[in-house]
Amino acid sequence: MTTKPDYGNWVSKRIIYTPAVVGFMLCMLGLLYSVLLIPAVFFLLVSAYFAYARVLFAGKRNVQGRIVGLVLSHLDWSGEGRALDIGCGSAALTLKFAERYPTAQVVGVDSWSGNWEYSKEMCERNAKIEGVTGRVTFQKASASALPFGDGYFDAVVSNLVFHEVRDSADKREVVREALRVLKKGGKFSFQDLFLLRHVYGDIGDFLATIQRWGISRVEFVETRKASFIPLMLRLPFMVGRIGIIAGEK
């Protein structure tokens, strides 16, 4: 068994290899039709960009891990009680949570479907490597219909999940479902593509809507403004539209 946990990489190898293959094919054709060298260079540059982004995310700079950590840095919680990580994926946030709050019982839920190479087995393996198996459990569930009663958790977190939930057309309702299982006075911190207007609308209006749901305190923080994020990753299709909604019910 590997001695290091595997949390994957947000930049898949496919998004690197596909434009690279297209670029090389166009280069070959460009020997016959020189006009094709222009799109060939474009595709090769796209491949190079995503290859470098992959290194930044999970290399020595560990931008991916530090972005995950932002969720907890905006969670103002004592660490006592039950906590939920919605859409735990490879359990990167779940296990950071368990390590930060050693007396908390943490549950990670995910559908483990779609294009991501994550699984419940991966989460359990990572938890064993990190030495927190006694305080962390994982179960399969949809973020749109959480299998818990109202107010069951003292803290709820999520990282880049809500916009991916396929069985709910209105992603704002997924956020509402996450808040449903949070107890009154409980704390929450959600990171997602909250600046995508066609998904969440105007962020100011959305925060006002959240307060109308009975949330006593809510704030918004733009992730791209974090000092550790390189300029090349602040583009709209990378980190540029990510933000954190955090507060108290």
Image (spheres, rainbow, N blue to C red):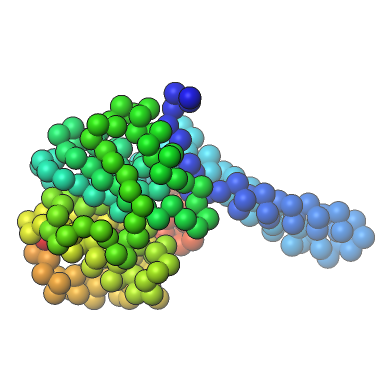
- 125 or 173: which is nearer to us? 125
For this view, does 123 lie left or right of residue 22? Answer: left
- 51 or 45: which is nearer to us? 51
x 41%, y 33%: residue: 125
Give x and y (percent) for residue 79. Answer: 13, 40
x 30%, y 47%: residue: 108
User: How many marks on residues?
Assistant: 0
For this view, does 6 lie left or right of residue 95? Answer: right
For the question of whether residue 229 can be seen, the reply is no
Instruction: Check the image and report above or below for 197 versus 50.
Output: below
* Residue 173 occupies quadrant: bottom left
Instruction: Check the image and report above or below for 233 versus 168.
Output: above
Give x and y (percent) for residue 221. Answer: 26, 57
x 28%, y 41%: residue: 137
* Residue 170 occupies quadrant: bottom left
Give x and y (percent) for residue 203. Answer: 28, 70
- 125 or 43: which is nearer to us? 125
Instruction: Check the image and report above or below for 149 versus 203.
Output: above
Instruction: Check the image and report above or below for 162 versus 197.
Output: above
Give the quarter of the figure containing the C terminus: bottom left
* Residue 228 occupies quadrant: top left
For this view, does 48 lie left or right of residue 225? Answer: right
x 46%, y 35%: residue: 6
Give x and y (percent) for residue 142. Answer: 35, 60
- 247 or 223: which is nearer to us? 247
For this view, does 93 lie left or right of residue 25? Answer: left
